[in-house]
Amino acid sequence: MRSSDGNDVLLDRDCGDASVFERVLEQLHDNAQQRAHALSFFGKFAALNTGMSTQVFTASTLAHLRWLAAALGPRDADTIQTLLWLLSNMMVDGPTMVAPILAAGVLQTLVPVAPVPPALSGGVDDDSKLGLWALACDMRWVLHNTLSTGSRGAEAA
């Protein structure tokens, strides 16, 4: 990574208990509010310049995200949606990030716990249905990005 003055800067996440990154990572295992803040923190990293995700979201970090996905249920729609946004932003880096996400099983763990939206007979009659359909659209987008990114990676090889 380069600093504003053009010098290389290492992202040091391995400095034990003093590491801010590690402390935020631990918040994924806390209550819903702390998880939301932690996911927001990681979302900021994923939205940075291309290439940042591969430095930040290592196998160890992805294991924490997989654990979070496994701990969620249909009542955690907001957290599921935030995790989907995070994954989508991480996938901007292409096959170099999609492959580790799939290898860690994050997406495969998240898909079965996502709530299924109800049928819309006669239109949307309450906000909860609309929210579940928005989540389903985000899931579709992440799955599309996963599949289309993989095929672009295969074409480039």
Image: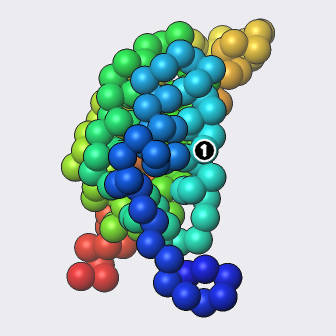
Figure quadrant of the C terminus: bottom left
- Three-letter amino acid code at the position of disc 1: Phe
* Left or right: 103 as drawn, with respect to 24: left
Image quadrant where residue 29 sits: top left
Image quadrant where residue 82 sits: top right
Residue sitting farthest toward the bottom: 6
Badge 1 density bin: few <14, some 14–19, many ≥20, Cα 10 Å? some
| Residue 38 visible here | yes
| Residue 137 visible here | no
- Taking the spot 32% from the left edge, 50% from the top edge, the residue there is 101
- Taking the spot 46% from the left edge, 48% from the top edge, the residue there is 19
Q: Nearer the viewer, residue 149 or 119?
A: 149
- Taking the spot 43% from the left edge, 18% from the top edge, the residue there is 72
Q: How is the structure coloured here? A: rainbow
**What percent of the width, then of the height, locates residue 122?**
73, 12
Residue carrying label 1: 41
**What percent of the width, then of the height, locates residue 67?**
32, 28
**What percent of the width, then of the height, locates residue 109?**
31, 30
Label 1, secondary structure: give it. helix
**What percent of the width, then of the height, locates residue 89?**
54, 55
* Left or right: 86 as drawn, with respect to 110: right
- Taking the spot 28% from the left edge, 55% from the top edge, the residue there is 100
